[in-house]
Image (spheres, coloured by chain):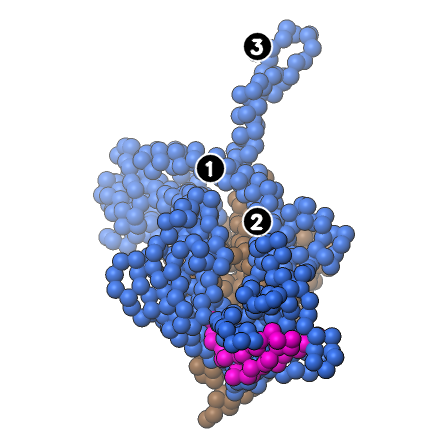
Amino acid sequence: MTESTWAALSDYSVFSALLVLSGALVGYVVHLARTVPREDTTSDGAMTSAPRVTQQQLVDPAGAPTPDGECSGPALVGVATTHGPDHETGRPDPGPARRASGIAWMLTLLGTALVVAGVVLRALDVHRWPLGNMYEFALAGAMFTLLAYIAWSTRRDLRWLGAFVLAPVLAVLGSAVTIWYTEASQLMPSLRSYWLAVHVTVATMTVAVFTLGAALGALYLIQDRIETGGSARARRSFMSRLPTAQALERLAYAAHVVAFPMWTFTVIAGAIWARQAWGSYWNWDPKEVWSFVIWVAYAAYLHARATTGWKRQNATWIALAGFGAVIFNFAVVNVFIVGMHSYSGL
Amino acid sequence: MSTDQRPTGPASDAHGPAPGGPVTQPRLGLVGWLRFVWRQLTSMRTALLLLLLLTVAAIPGGTFPQRSIDAARTAQWITDHPTTGPALDRLGFFEVYASPWFAAIYLLLFVSLIGCVAPRSRIHWRQVRADPPRAPRRLDRLGAHRELEIDGHPDEVRERLRTTLRRRRYRIHAYDDATLSAEKGHLRETGNLVFHLALIGVLVGVAWGHLLGWKGDVILPVGQTFANTLSRYDTFSPGPMVDVNHLDPFTLTLDEFAVSFETKDRGRGQFGAPRDFTATTRFTPASGPAREVDIKVNHPLETGGGTVFLLGNGYAPHVTVKSADGRVLYSDATPFLAQDNNYTSVGAIKVPGAQPDQLGFAGFFLPTGVIDQQEGPHSVFPDALDPQLALTAFSGTLFPGGAPQSVYTLDTAQMTALPGKDGADQLRILLRPGDTYDLPGGRGSITFDGVERFAGLSIRTDPGKTLTLVSALLALAGLVLSFVVRRRRVFVRVRPADDPARTVVAVGGLAKDDDTAMDDEVADIILSVKGTP
């Protein structure tokens, strides 16, 4: 097989992934739509306080554990699997919704495999780490976002999140194949370093986790608005199918707590590499400036969340602003701003 | 860390004015005011505000061109924006990271950080050495709580729980026979403090590097030797505390400079893209034998007295200028600076020894030259496949007033262009290697002997970089610790049950922050005593 055949296969793989993941997105949307409760089950208690009831059973002194150790059951361990009954509300899904989410999950796995294949085939074509230009960054970013979602899904039921992960992933993949597409090629000398594999890989993974954090943060803000005075219609929308605002906020925080040290590592590794390649570990290159802005913004988010008297909503807005800087750093700085990180290939 | 402790008017009336008199505000005095300002500065809200300010303040440096990175582009931007340019310049938008307002923000932030972290370290130090507190009277008031009646004597059950807690790395203290107080997770606060203190280390390392570091650039054509002395540098920028007369006396000879450019891939922007630069050098350290070293991009040479980076390259055409009677006036490899990716290069040849007037040549070196009407002389490929030298010639005074000038440009203020032979206003000379051109008016000749490559070397030291790196890694380690470790307190209380052979055991857990797993922890601990009969 010639090298350009590998590249062509990679392209086919990515195109197929786009189709398959679009199917998965539809599946997750159907899942959300079909599980919207009917009028008669929308009393507040049934939907929003159900998880809290479970919590209280664990804490409630009255519900002291029975001698036979009932409390060591699944509810205590708190690990929800992806399939089976809905662990957020404790009620089984309606049949069509369950089927839709099952199909969506399988398509997500298949689409992710195709994206991974696209990345690997490209690496085989060029015999180097496949993170050398804008197209490859986008591809790897989409891949890591999907992998992070899948990995997290094995620990808890995240079917409700599927649509909100696949939508940004599809947007990035679509942009990758249309506006950022770059033919497979070799690297310029400054990129020929094992630090490429370290720095850029971790950077891309971090952006994936930030993406999950931003999706959860945005959902939290919406859910919070609905809970504190949304209309009856809003309360009956698909948002009622999602966890409570408090739970969403905690999940968003968890994602950011993972991503922030990763970003710190990205910046440190980048500085070590910058010293190797450019002679100085920090040059205030535009990419470095924006990486610094992102770091400080998320540091502010973590501080805001820990500051008494600061609302969680406002803290989340800071995190979303940080994600805005992440997007700017990728989509704008790479393409339009002159600097030493000009590797977009565009 | 609020300022609520501040004395307020009516509340402090113990020594206040007589009843019925006017309400006087308590006077803070100088010390009071200082304390007030200090409390404000070190409060979490202020730290947060400063962080947000720092975020916003850093943005212009990533958006506008910066003088420290590209002075020419900055000047161009200001020229292109005649109204906003100078105004933004006065505000320091083109030197953001050296501007007073940026420094003010991060210095205040660090003062705030120290003011917050120092007392916290003191408290933490005390807490780490202190025993966990006495168990509260009612464990069922705690966030997580379990009670269980099992077989066994209270003392024995308590010992089993002590073993469990020890296995789970709790520090345990028993204030009496019926309770246990256990605590773990001090590393969380330790990590948090290490993170913040290490950031100070990063700042100190950066400052130290600025004060004691230096960098110098030198252009070294193949075959030439560089000796590490101040006068040999083309540019040299030392930190304020550097002794420039004591540079490490090593030498470096550039024996060979190998380049390769993309010739196969015709994809967007790929044809002619650089693939590899390797400078083969002979390095003679200040003491010790000489050795062969390859310097590449990403593979600098550590000399011990500065690190040699390969940051640029280009062409140095070798040119000989002779007088009409055949005397050699000039013969040297003259570096020309590349202007684009295909190495269309500009430069100047200055011949001060020419008679009766000094001679100067300015123009282009083209490694693979094409001259067309629209673009003028330019190169279409970066490698030297068809090297050409396109020059115009001037005569007059090269260095008017003796002022220093760039070696790559000709100051033609007191020079006149030599006229062309066919009546053109300017003489245009195009030379390929080996060509000689006879200058008009008996001014001699110019020969393009051949072309050498040059390596653009940058030699730098940064004595603060190790401190910066170590601090940054410590900060990262502290950060991970502070996110991973959970701070937990567990209290145990045992009492005999109604059945004398049985014991009622209660376990309560207290967690800081959002610790949703505390409940599981308490359940696991209490179930562990049940599991072992």
**What residue is at 54 percent from the left and 65 percent from the top?**
B353
**What residue is at 67 percent from the left and 61 percent from the top?**
B414
Q: Residue A174: x percent and y percent?
A: 63, 76
> Badge 1 is on which residue?
B114
> Badge 2 is on which residue?
B97
The segment highlighted magenta reads B426-454
Viewer-side residue, A173 vs B358: B358
Of all chains, the one bearing label 2 is: B
Q: Which mark is residue B15?
A: 3
Amino acid at dot 2? Tyr
Residue A24 seen by the camera: no
CA gap between label 1 and label 3 equals 35 Å
Nearer to us of marks 1 and 3 is 1
Sooner in the amino-acid sequence: mark 1 or mark 3 = 3
Chain letter matching colour brown: A
- Element under label 1? helix
Q: Residue A117: x percent and y percent?
A: 49, 81
* Residue B167 falls left or right of residue B310: left
Sooner in the amino-acid sequence: mark 3 or mark 2 = 3
**What residue is at 38 percent from the left and 43 percent from the top?**
B190
Residue A12 seen by the camera: yes
